[in-house]
Image (cartoon, rainbow, N blue to C red):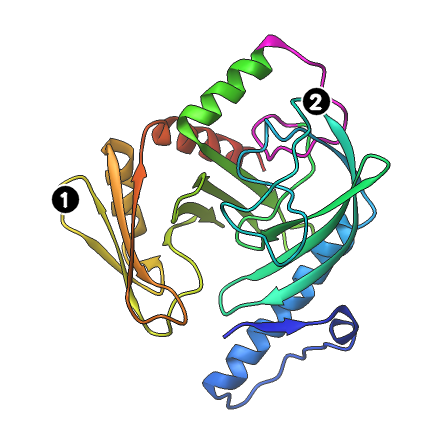
Amino acid sequence: MKKIIGMAVLSFLTFSAFAGFETPEDQRTKRLTERALETKNYIDSMVGRTAWYNSNECLTEKIYPDTSNISYGSATYSTNGEYKPIVFESAEMQQDTYKDYVTFKIKIGETDEGYIQTSTAMPLKISDNEYVGCFKANKPIKKESTISKSIDDILFGWSYSCKKDKFNQSKSCYLHRANSDLMVGIYNGQHSVYVGRDHYPRSQSAIKIDSNTPIYGYEGSSSTPQKAIEQLKRGKVAYTRYKEWPYDYNQDGEVDLTGFTEKYNEMIDEYKKL
């Protein structure tokens, strides 16, 4: 069950270290509180900043007209292949069990506005690094290579983002294919393979690569991620299965693995540089 936490409430959140007995609910509340503060710091680092946005370069990070239509198939903002300045004006946070969702209100150019949603699992980032997100700190110079990269992204659809936490120095990278239910990541040296979203409580999930034996997990998280990654690097197609809240039935998906290995290796190289 998702929980909406307003920014006014966040300002009063505190957590304290203590020794003693804790119930699972105490531990859960503490984790959520700590993560909420980390998410607030992330929001504070983004609100007020300006970035350059090109809808043709951002296949997985779309700007939507309102908060009630942020999903695949909804209308999205087009820059007609040009870079436009956008300002992150404000944000709202929605807390889930394993990650927080952040919805930014965006000012586009002089007159337009919209909304973009991201999550703490793979937060959007403003960077001039061509391999880190698609929101640029400076207006890019149009080059032929940009067109080639756009074509590659359309064909293969794999993109990743990386970050290093300025407070605790933790490092993370996450790789995702556009419009799929599959995400691969590395956090402080620990690999992860994640399937689906908004999982039905205590439900089983699975991923099957080509004709290999299915690899099972719990609420989307694979129990043997490195085994799954090795199969993904050699595979052609991945089949996913999970149960999405509030419906207790299987959601099946299929992911083309073309280009996965190349982008995965790029992500690992970028992770090592953090």
From the viewer's perspective, is the residue at label 1 or at label 2 nearer? 2
* Residue 137 is covered by the magenta coloring: yes
Residue 2 x %, y %:
54, 72
* Residue 97 is covered by the magenta coloring: no
Question: Which residue is painted at 72% across and 25% down in the image?
Answer: 83
Give the labeled residue for mark 1. 212
User: Residue lying farthest right?
Assistant: 110
Give amino acid for label 2.
Glu
Q: Secondary structure at mark 1?
A: loop
Give amino acid for label 1.
Asn
**Image: magenta residue range:** 129-144
Task: Assess disc 2: are there few (<14), some (14-19) or many (≥20) residues with their C-alpha within 10 Å of its C-alpha.
Answer: some
Question: Which residue is painted at 54% across and 34% down in the image?
Answer: 59
Main secondary structure type of the part rendered in magenta:
loop
Residue 200 x %, y %:
37, 70
Q: Nearer the viewer, residue 45 or 70?
A: 70
Residue 218 x %, y %:
32, 65
Question: Which residue is painted at 60% across and 35% down in the image?
Answer: 133
Mark 1–mark 2 distance (CA, rounded to whole Å): 44 Å
Task: Assess disc 1: are there few (<14), some (14-19) or many (≥20) residues with their C-alpha within 10 Å of its C-alpha.
Answer: few
Q: Nearer the viewer, residue 111 or 173?
A: 111
Give the labeled residue for mark 2. 82
Q: Quadrant of the C terminus?
A: top right
Left or right of 191, for residue 162: right
Q: Nearer the viewer, residue 141 or 132?
A: 141
Q: Quadrant of residue 230?
A: top left
Residue 247 x %, y %:
35, 70
Which numbered disc, 1 or 2, marks the residue that appears first in the sequence? 2
Left or right of 203, for residue 63: right
Kindly indicate whether the residue at mark 2 contacts the one at mark 1 (C-beta within 8 angstroms).
no
